[in-house]
Image (cartoon, helix red, strand yellow):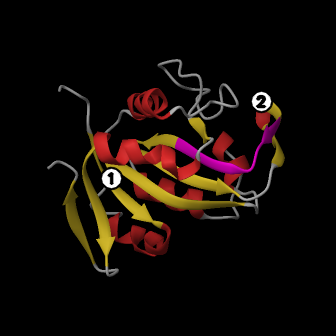
């Protein structure tokens, strides 16, 4: 079976503190933030206006061409100048980032986002969110996962070719998803 796969790091919440160690080795690429909103929220998001976000899990896909880790670390900060659509959501006190997926050298945020949308039954609640400057005219780069983390299972098992996970807070262990 011919299928598209992606190589990346999966970093769990307890290992976010290790991200700065990757800053010099991972320069650019795409990323996904798995987030959980504990309470429904109405948030003013720039030109998109007042948006309603139901309680639940969200997956945001982005890219940075020069400083990927710095961008991800910025998303983890609660206090920051609001610049991008995602900043309006990540500064909400009811939101927590649960996992981060990094795709070094993979400058295909749209390809990753479209593939995840295709296989996961995720929904775009707010067209244009995170994709106002998208050259591929994506409907949105913020996905709502109605069934929560269960929707990530197929992605992890079938589309992540190799996953790198931090183990024991020190090194990276390579785990292959292919049998």
* Label 2: few (<14), some (14–19) or many (≥20) C-alpha neighbours in 10 Å: some
| Residue 52 within the magenta-colored segment of the rendering | yes
Q: Secondary structure at mark 1?
A: loop
The earlier-in-sequence mark between 2 and 1 is 1
Quadrant of residue 175 within the rendered picture: bottom left
Residue 156 left/right relative to 78:
left
Quadrant of residue 80 within the rendered picture: bottom right
Quadrant of residue 12 within the rendered picture: bottom left
Q: Which span of residues is magenta-colored?
A: 51-60
User: Which SS type dominates the magenta stretch?
Assistant: strand
- Residue at (43, 73) in percent of width and height: 15
* Foreground of the two, 70 or 8: 8
* Foreground of the two, 33 or 22: 33
Q: Give how far apart the Cα atoms at labels 2 and 1 are.
A: 31 Å
Which residue in the protein does label 2 denote? 48
Which residue in the protein does label 1 denote? 27
- Residue at (37, 51) in percent of width and height: 102
- Residue at (31, 47) in percent of width and height: 157
**Above-or-below relation of 172 to 58:** below
Disc 2 or disc 1, which is closer to the eye?
Answer: 2
**Image coordinates for residue 93, horizontal then vertical, percent:** 76, 63
**Image coordinates for residue 101, horizontal then vertical, percent:** 41, 52
| Residue 154 within the magenta-colored segment of the rendering | no
User: Which corner quadrant holds the N terminus?
Assistant: top left
């Amino acid at each position: 079976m011919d299928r598209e796969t992606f190589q990346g790091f999966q970093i769990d919440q307890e290992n976010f503190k290790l991200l700065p160690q990757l800053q010099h080795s991972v320069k650019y690429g795409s990323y996904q933030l798995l987030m959980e909103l504990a309470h429904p929220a109405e948030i003013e998001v720039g030109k998109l206006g007042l948006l309603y976000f139901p309680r639940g899990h969200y997956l945001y896909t982005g890219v940075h061409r020069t400083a990927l880790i710095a961008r991800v670390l910025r998303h983890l900060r609660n206090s920051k100048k609001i610049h991008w659509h995602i900043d309006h959501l990540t500064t909400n006190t009811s939101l927590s980032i649960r996992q981060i997926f990094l795709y070094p050298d993979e400058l295909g945020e749209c390809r990753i986002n479209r593939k995840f949308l295709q296989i996961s039954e995720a929904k775009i609640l707010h067209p244009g969110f995170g994709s106002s400057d998208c050259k591929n005219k994506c409907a949105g780069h913020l996905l709502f996962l109605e069934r929560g983390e269960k929707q990530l299972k197929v992605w992890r098992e079938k589309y992540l070719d190799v996953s790198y996970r931090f183990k024991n807070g020190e090194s990276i262990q390579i785990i292959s998803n292919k049998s």
